[in-house]
Amino acid sequence: MLIQVSKKLLEQLSICLGALLFFTFYFGITLSDLTPSFTFGIFLLPVTMGMVNVFSFHLIPEFLFRQKYYWFALYTAYTLVISFFLIALSSFYGFIFINSLETMDSSFMLSKNLYLIIVGVYIVVLVTSLFSSYSESYKIHLRNKELQFA
């Protein structure tokens, strides 16, 4: 039980670190100092991790793998609408927070507009969902193979 919890925690931490690194370089591609883009990525991290968990650990295994396509599409649409709002809110507060810091030399100007911020978040969600789906599909394949030869 403890090993399973620590494995899940390690998986979540690695997804967080990967998403934060992606956001840092995605938003800081035109900057010489990556600190503001790192800080901006921290603001997007809770929304991103929430969406990764919803898609990778709930919607895909519960609806897509069980061939409940209507419910998967419906809940995906709900998730997209809610996440668009949360991404816009996080981006707004991240931008305001970074520009209000007196330690920054110049004001942080985003090199991406809101649509590209949403695309960046969904790139992380898509990649992690694909890895999670592949992993789950491989486990199902091994279980079926084990049952076949048992």
Image (tube, rainbow, N blue to C red):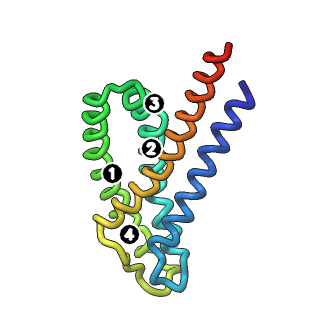
Question: Which callout, 3 or 1, points at the residue further toward the start of the chain?
Answer: 3
Q: Position of residue 24 (x, y in %)?
A: 52, 69
Vertical order, 92 against 149 (above or below): below
Circle count:
4
User: Viewer-nearest of labels 4 and 1?
Assistant: 1
* Nearest to N terminus: mark 1 or mark 2: 2
Q: Nearer the viewer, mark 2 or mark 4?
A: 2
Query: Marks 3 and 4: which is nearer the front?
Result: 3
N-terminal label among 3 and 4: 3
Residue at the far front in the pictured view: 149
Position of the C terminus, as image quadrant, is: top right
Badge 3 vs badge 2, beta-carbon distance below 8 Å: no
Nearer mark to the viewer, of 3 and 2? 3
For label 1, the residue is: 86
- The residue type indicated by label 1 comes to Leu
Q: In what element is the residue under mark 1?
A: helix
Q: Contact (CB < 8 A) between labels 1 and 2?
A: yes
Q: Amino acid at mark 2?
A: Gly
Say which residue appears at 40% left-offset and 24% top-offset.
Answer: 66
The disc, 3 or 2, on the residue closer to the chain's N-terminal end is 2
Question: CB under 8 Å between callouts 4 and 1?
Answer: no
What's the distance in space between the residues labelled 1 and 2, CA to CA?
Answer: 10 Å
Indicate the secondary structure of the residue bearing disc 2: helix
Residue 50 circle label: 2
Q: Which residue is mark 4?
A: 95
Neighbor class of circle 2 (other Cα within 10 Å; few <14, some 14-19, many 20+) is few
- Is 9 displayed left or right of 126 in the figure? right
Q: Which residue is mark 3?
A: 61
Along the horizontal axis of the image, is 43 left or right of 77?
Answer: right
Residue nearest the viewer, comparing 75 with 82: 75
The first of marks 2 and 4 along the sequence is 2
